[in-house]
Amino acid sequence: MNTFIIVVVLVLSITIAIYFGTEESLETAITTFLNEIGERGDALTLLISKGRRYPSRMHLLERILQEKEVPKTTGLTAVHFAAIHKEHSVLDSLLKHGKFQRDAKVVSGRLAGATPLHFALSSCMQQKIAVSRDLLRGGLMELDAFNLHEGMTMSPSLQALYTAPGSTAGKPVSMSVVGDAVNHWNNELILRSDLLSEVSISSTEASLQRTPAHFSALCENIELLNIIKERASTKSVLAKQDKLGQTVAHYLAAKGNPAYKAFDYDKKDILGRSASDVFLAPPTQRSSVKESTIQVGGGWSLGNANISVTNNCDIDVVQGELSPDRFFGDYLSLGRPVLMKGAASSWGLKKRWTRDSILKKYSKFEVEVGAIPYSSLFGMESKRVTLGEFIKKNMSEPSGSKNYVFHTFGDPDDGLTASVPHPPKFLKGIPSSLLRSSPGEPQFKGQFYLGTRGTGAPEHIHSDAWNALMYGAKSWWLAPPQKSQFSTTVPPGDYKPRDGLFYCQQAEGDILFVPSDWGHSTRNDDTTVGVAVEFRFARSFL
């Protein structure tokens, strides 16, 4: 009997068992499939049969199928994928059969050495983003990549986010509160599935030699770090250094978390920095306020002859583009923002993205338009129009429109974005092994943006990103990981930020780097045209 027929027959039998039979008949069918197909069959059958109940199971199925060409000698199995997508029932079903080990290591490739524990901890930022967006949409409980339904049964704090009065009313969502709920969710899955074995705790993955404790620190999961500290046979587990020489204490200190002191073993990273050296201090005004006026170039002034700009910036400001060594050492490796003044002033995009050039060459180019970037992700209206239509209808008066163009691209040869440098010079010297991409995704994700005065982006987080402004001026409010939020409200003209935020104004030709996990909101001080590119620094991802 060939594999396809076995799959069809057993999928039908398991579906019948789930809806009309007993748990024993389900176990019998799974066991039969496991004997016939092998490791992947168990997960595939269970996922297909229950796919209608939880969309995340179908997402997990898709991920497993994407890996079907991976030789079995890699050691990458359905258990690893079940852990990363928080499929607790799937994970338990797999482990019951005895053919999977809860501390199984990937044996080759950049993931070599990674256990299901690594996988379970590696997606906390994506979980935070998914839960926050879902809450802002009204608490629909629709997370394609994670099994939120099981998470709700495991984590009272996660359940409280959805049941608290007014919790789904579109109010700003605290990343600290969501992060605590996500950590509790992950800890429950880890403990219930008994993933904290001595082997798993001490294992390091090949790409950056990180232990599960490093990933716990990235998530600021202090509870799990304390459990690891209690269970580890030696303290050296928490003192282990990754490829950059950084320990758990460095990871926590860089996020401004004072808990780093409890895990500090006085180690120094490859640049000679201790954990206390990299501790993120509260914002201070680093540049004096010197207000001046500029004229928006490129034909985008819309009748506003001049706009006020300052050099007021609470983050580091450097003149011109940083060298790769300095950008990596002082900013990327520490998760620190920086403004590079005039670094993009000579880019070819300035000529390509003048008003006349866009109307002449790209007027029929379709883009997404909404009140905020990615409006549809938050249940808000968005539509596709041509650039010519948008400019004609929305950019003929100084008051402008409250719509914002945010066009996503993954490959810079679509015409409009053909001249976007990737990587730019400050990233070119960084080894490709330190820049990560997700399965089926490009190594970077770019967005062309065009907005009038008063438009902008509500506070949100994502992976590391750089933003180059070709024309106009843009105000930024940046929140360290412990202060960050998710919102659907653009900062108004009289915006009064909460304590702990870093302010910076970006002018034409400036590049601003926003680290992973940092909240940031923007307001366009006049018409703005530019590009933002998200990328994945390996430290933040598996």
Image: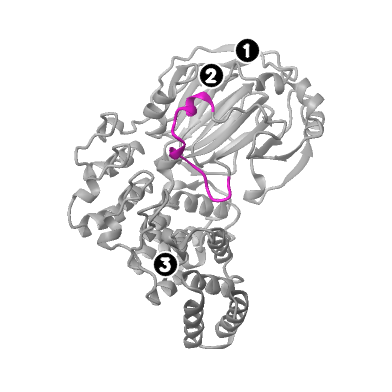
Question: Which circle, 2 or 3, is nearer the viewer?
Answer: 2
Residue shown at the point (31%, 32%) measured from the top left: 278
Crowd tier of the residue under label 3, counting other residues whose Cα lies within 10 Å: few below 14, some 14–19, many 20 or above: some
Residue located beneath label 3 in the image: 154
Q: Which residue is nearer to you in this view: 161 or 89? A: 89
Label 2 to label 3: alpha-carbon separation: 48 Å
Q: Which amino acid lies under the numbered mark 2 shown in the image of this protein?
A: Ala
Residue located beneath label 1 in the image: 294
Label 1 to label 3: alpha-carbon separation: 55 Å
At numbered mark 3, what does the secondary structure look like: helix, strand or loop?
helix
Query: Is there CB contact under 8 Å for labels 2 and 3?
Result: no
Question: Which circle, 2 or 1, is nearer the viewer?
Answer: 2
Residue shown at the point (75%, 20%) measured from the top left: 302
Looking at the rendered image, the quarter that the N terminus falls into is bottom right
At numbered mark 1, what does the secondary structure look like: helix, strand or loop?
strand
Q: Which residue is nearer to you in this view: 244 or 218? A: 244
Taking the image as shown, residue 131 lies to the left or right of residue 194, namely: right
Taking the image as shown, residue 169 lies to the left or right of residue 209, namely: right
